[in-house]
Amino acid sequence: MSPAKLSLVSDNQSSNPDVEAHSIRLDDFSAYYGKNCIISDVNLKLPNKGVTCLIGPSGTGKSTILRWLNRINEDTENASFSGTIKVLGRDFISGYPDVTELRRRVGMVFQQPCVFPCSIYDNMLMGLRGRKLSEMQARDSVEQGLKSASLWDEVSHRLETRADALSLGQQQRLCLARALVLKPDVLLLDEPTASIDPVSSRAIEDLVMSLGNKISVVMVTHNIGQAKRISDHVVFICDGKVVEQGPRTHMFSSHCSAKTKTYITEEFCDC
Ligand SMILES: Nc1ncnc2c1ncn2[C@@H]1O[C@H](COP(=O)(O)OP(=O)(O)OP(=O)(O)O)[C@@H](O)[C@H]1O
Ligand SMILES: [Mg+2]
C-alpha cells in the first residue's frame, strides 16, 4: 500500500476568520441519556492541528463525546447535554443553523465501516451531492479521495462495483476517503482500526499522522501502542471525567499521573 497522500485537506483554516486557536472547545460539558449522566463537566481545548487520542475504558463516554461534536446525538432519543461546545470558534448549535455545514467541516468515521448499498464511486460522491460538479471534477474528487486513503490502487479498476463487496479494511478506508473528499477542518475517528487487519490499520495510522500536520484529528482508540505511535495529545477519560490530558511526551512519560500510568501500562483502571 502506498503511503497516504494529502491532497484533500481543508484550506478553510487559513482563510476563515472564525477559526480560533482551538478547533474544538468544551466548557463544563455534561451529557446524559435520560437521567444518567454519562459525561460530567468536561473541559477540553483541542488544538487546530495535530492528532488527539481519546483513551479510556469501555463505556466511559468517549463515543458520546464524538457523537455530540458531530451532533449525531441530537437525533438520539433520550440524549441531552449541558454546557457549551465551540467548533472552529462557533457554538456548535447556534453557530451552525445548518447542521450540514457542521458535518462538512467536522467529518466522522465510525468504528464499524458504514458504506451505502451502492457503488464505490457513488459512495464517494454522497457528501458532494449538493454541489454542481462536472463529470470531470467528480471523477477527480473521487480519485483524490481514494488516493488520500490509500485505496485507489485497489479499486480504481472497479469503481462501479458495490461498496459493500469490499473487505472490511477497504470499507473503512472508503469511509475515510468519503470524509476527506469534503475537506474537513476536523476529523473525528471512533476506533477506526478496531475491525481491520494490521496492514490496513498501519495504513490508516500513517494517514492520520499525515492529516494531523494540517487539520485537527480526534481519534478514539483502545490500542495504547497506537496512541503512543500517532498522537500529539492524549486525553484520558474515565467514568465520564477527564482524568488527565496533555502532550504525548507527558502522558507516556514517568511524569504522568499514577492513574494514567496504571491505565497505559496495565490497561487497567483504578479511577
Ligand atoms: N443511546 C443510548 N441510550 C442510553 N445509553 C447509552 C446510549 N448510548 C450509549 N449509552 C451508554 O452511555 C455510556 C457511554 O457509552 P459510550 O458509547 O460513549 O462509551 P465508550 O467510552 O465509547 O465505550 P467503548 O470504548 O466501549 O466504545 C455507556 O454506559 C452506554 O451504555
Ligand atoms: Mg465507543
Image (cartoon, rainbow, N blue to C red):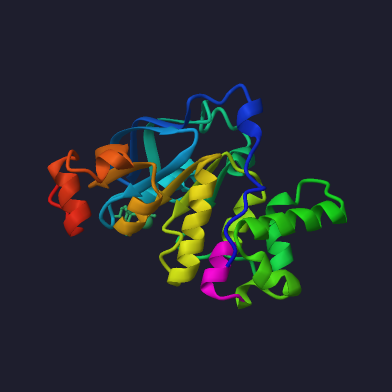
| Quadrant in which ligand 2 is drawn | bottom left
User: Most prominent secondary structure in the magenta stretch?
Assistant: helix
**Closer to us: 126 or 48:** 48
Quarter occupied by residue 52: top left
Which residue of the protein is positioned furthest toward the top in this rendering?
Answer: 17
Vertical relation: 48 (above or below) 64: above
Residue at 52 percent of width and 65 percent of height: 113
Where is residue 215? Give x, y as percent. Answer: 54, 39
Where is residue 239? Give x, y as percent. Answer: 22, 47
Observer able to see residue 240: no
Residue at 45 percent of width and 61 percent of height: 111
Which residue of the protein is positioned furthest toward the bottom in this rendering?
Answer: 165
Where is residue 172? Give x, y as percent. Answer: 54, 64
- The magenta span reads 166-173
Where is residue 150? Give x, y as percent. Answer: 60, 62
Say whether residue 178 is left or right of residue 221.
Answer: right
Observer able to see residue 173: yes
**Closer to us: 97 or 55:** 55
Vertical relation: 200 (above or below) 245: below
Say whether residue 131 is left or right of residue 26.
Answer: right
Residue at 17 percent of width and 58 percent of height: 266
Is 117 within the magenta? Answer: no
Vertical relation: 193 (above or below) 23: below
Question: Which quarter of the figure is the N terminus placed in?
Answer: bottom right
Vertical relation: 104 (above or below) 204: above
Total of numbered circles in the picture? 0
Is 172 within the magenta? Answer: yes
